[in-house]
Image (cartoon, rainbow, N blue to C red):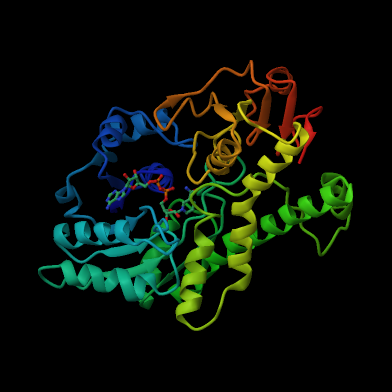
Amino acid sequence: MRIGIIGQGYVGLTISAFASKHHEVVGFDLNPAIVKQLNSGISHIEGVKSADLVDAISRGSYKATTNGSDLSNAEIVVIAVPTPLDNERKPDLTYIESACKVIAENLNGPALIINESTSFPGTIRNYIKPTIEKYSKRQLNHQFAISPERVDPGRKDFNQKNTPRLYAGLTPEATARTREFYSTFCDNLVEVSSPEVAEAAKLFENTFRQVNIALVNELAQISHALGINVRETLDAAGTKPYGFMKFAPSAGVGGHCIPVDPSYLADVAEKAGVEATFIKRANEVNLDMPKYIASRVQKDNGGSLKDKKVLVVGVAYKPNVADTRETPAELLIDALKDLGAIVTWNDPVVGVWHGVESSPLIGADIAVVVTKHHVVASEDILKSAPYVFDTTGKVKGAVQL
Ligand SMILES: NC(=O)c1ccc[n+]([C@@H]2O[C@H](COP(=O)([O-])OP(=O)(O)OC[C@H]3O[C@@H](n4cnc5c(N)ncnc54)[C@H](O)[C@@H]3O)[C@@H](O)[C@H]2O)c1
């Protein structure tokens, strides 16, 4: 099949790598630097090997492009573009709209349009379909379906092949063609009765994590106030073989999904007249964790951080990836600066962040660990400052959250 994939980031490139083993894939992205790099066989995404790209390019089954007309003969188009929040933490569908425009203006014949980007129930039916129709000069009778992405970048045990994939089309034909496409590279397809169920399930998966992370972060604060070790408490609760799932306390939530997706559910809930109280409270607790951590560090250091050299260790939002989107390190740095500290950061996996290079892991008054990568040794973190506060539970010998 001839496949067009809009967006060549974490999701789009991962799908391109799997799909190009069986189909002819054109990866469309607005970023010319990424497109150039991909066409020279260099992957910018953890989990997509450059060697696989080189192989697909040499077989003629993959090319990246910034030119929308390269999508003109696609039989299937997959949308994998960002779905962030706007300044008011409301769904921002501008990238989806621009993807719809590219599709509408360039497809020559009817195609199956599948959305993999995360969004609220009703997005494919009430937003993507009408937007593509609005921008199309002639109506081509496209089919529409949803198959929300569940990729966890950097993860080794679950990938596109063995992660169960939800899907549903707006018509039985769209559903059948979606199944046909994904069954070429995914072993476990789960059909649901409507696109809205698939869209809602995706949002709920991440809302479940967001709420539980907030709950455990609240427990960390309660435990500290009561003089109880939160991680030992969680290990103890985790010995129950049923009815309990362990989550770990942290500096907050990061990445493109957990801090963002629940607000898509809250927004659509509010429009339907239901207040999403858990989601709102969970957001508040997680977003306040950096301030809580800064105040703990302040108390432990004589009640003042004024002019203290504080090193934030690990600014990626999770271990062993270079992704800093929505990282709680950002809020923590702000909170520490607000208390008068002179803040630098160290993260060899990220390397450069906001145009600034990672600082050496040495010579600070205080170190606060947000993310512990495998390549950064605990001994080196402990040597970086006389006082080390660890939010990860991985640096033994440091003051623990
Ligand atoms: N990253 C994850 O782990 C993950 C997991 C599941 C679902 N998702 C969802 O998948 C979607 C994509 O996320 P991602 O992590 O791949 O984002 P990303 O930022 O890694 O990549 C998006 C790419 O799309 C490109 N782009 C933006 N607008 C475009 C347009 N109009 N046309 C062509 N290219 C465009 C950007 O240049 C970028 O390269 C989001 O909805 C996200 O919530 C992400």
Residue at screen point 36% across, 28% down: 42
Identified at 21% across, 73% down, the residue is: 141
Tally of marks: 0
Query: Do we see residue 75 in this rendering?
Result: no
Spot occupied by residue 303 in the image (x, y as percentages of width and height): 73, 36
Where on the picture, by quarter, is residue 96? bottom left
Task: Indicate the quadrant where residue 212 lies.
Answer: bottom right
Position of residue 375 in the picture relative to residue 97 (left or right): right
Query: Which residue is at a point 47% across and 71% down the rendered structure image?
Result: 267
Name, please, the residue furthest toward the bottom: 273
Q: Position of residue 326 (x, y in %)?
A: 50, 46
Locate residue 271, reporting x and y percent: 45, 79
Decide which of 293, 31 is in the foreground and name it. 293
Position of residue 389 measured from the top left corner of the image (x, y, whole percent)? 73, 33
Name the image quarter holding residue 60: top left
Instruction: State whether residue 166 is above or below residue 42.
Output: below
Note whether 153 is above or below 179 in the view shown.
Answer: above
**Residue located 56% across and 53% down the image:** 163
Q: Is residue 192 left or right of residue 207?
A: left
Q: In this rendered view, identify the residue nearer to me: 3 or 356.
A: 356
Q: Depth check: 252 or 93 in front?
A: 252
Rendered-image quadrant of the C terminus = top right
* 64 lies above or below 77: above
344, 239: nearer the viewer: 344
- Could one spot residue 176 in this view of the protein? yes
* Outermost residue toward the left in this view: 137
